[in-house]
Image (tube, rainbow, N blue to C red):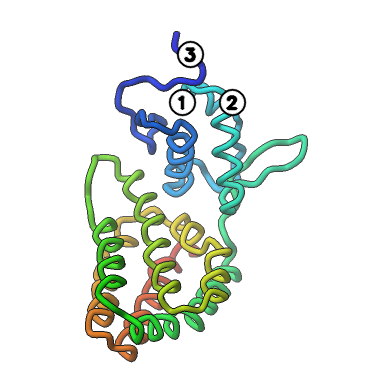
Amino acid sequence: MQAANSIDTSDRTAGGGRIQRSNSLVEDVYEAIFAQLMALKIAPGSRITVDSLVKEFNVSHTPIREALGRLEGEGLVLKTHLIGYRAAPQITRRRFDELYEMRLLLEPHAAAKAAAAMDEAKLNILLDAAGVMSRREGKDDRLRYSNFARQDAIFHDKIMEFSQNELIRQTLSHQHTHFHIFRLMYHARVTEEALDEHEAILAAFGAADPDAAQKAMRVHIEHSRDRLLPAFD
């Protein structure tokens, strides 16, 4: 039997309960649980038992608890004293509407400011972030979906950074919006259509056109909202 704090050297897929060996055990465990939460393999509101994850991933309790603590900080896991962990429930329709109202008020304006301050170095950073999202590496659709959610959050956060309003950036970041909205629906359409919309945003940034950037971001957020609305049907 393997040591409790080691991982099998064989390849493991995070979305299906198997994780790949790497230098950071906690990071691997975190990514595996994150993938299951994002792809709804761990159902919203369901109990998460540490012992079950220990058996599933063949690791000790420590990396499981550290990973769950990180996910708790991201709002994806809730911990109740004397009861334990559970997956955060899905956001309500009211919360969904509020998040998108906030995004439509803040992000198009921030995109315009970012476009006005755009330079080659910043554009390359955004192009790289968008390029990561467009990759289709690996056979695990659930893992690709969770990776897309994370990279989408990074892409939007970089735009907020380049808009040079740290308060707006922090306000959006603290909501963990992308994690919660992507968890509403596990569907290829959510990612495929977003890629085309990102291209329009990047084209506006490439032209350093604030008006086009503002419009492209507004269209993207409105379409994102419309794609996910059926989750409440």
Q: Amino acid at mark 3?
A: Ala
Q: Which one is earlier in the sequence, the residue at label 3 or at label 2?
A: 3
Q: Secondary structure at mark 2?
A: helix
Q: Residue at x 29, y 57 (%)?
A: 133
Q: Which mark is residue 57?
A: 1
Q: Which residue is mark 3?
A: 3
Residue 183 percent location from the top left of the image: 47, 55
Above or below: residue 47 compared with residue 115: above
Contact (Cβ within 8 Å) of mark 2 with mark 1: no
Going by the numbered disc 1, the residue's amino acid type is: Phe
| Rendered residue at 57%/75% (across/down) | 167
Determine which residue is flagged by label 2: 61
Looking at the picture, tell me which residue is in the foreground, 174 or 17. 174
Work out which residue is located at the far top of the displayed protein and give it.
1
Q: Does the rendering let one see residue 157?
A: yes
Q: Which three-letter amino acid code belongs to the residue tagged 2?
A: His
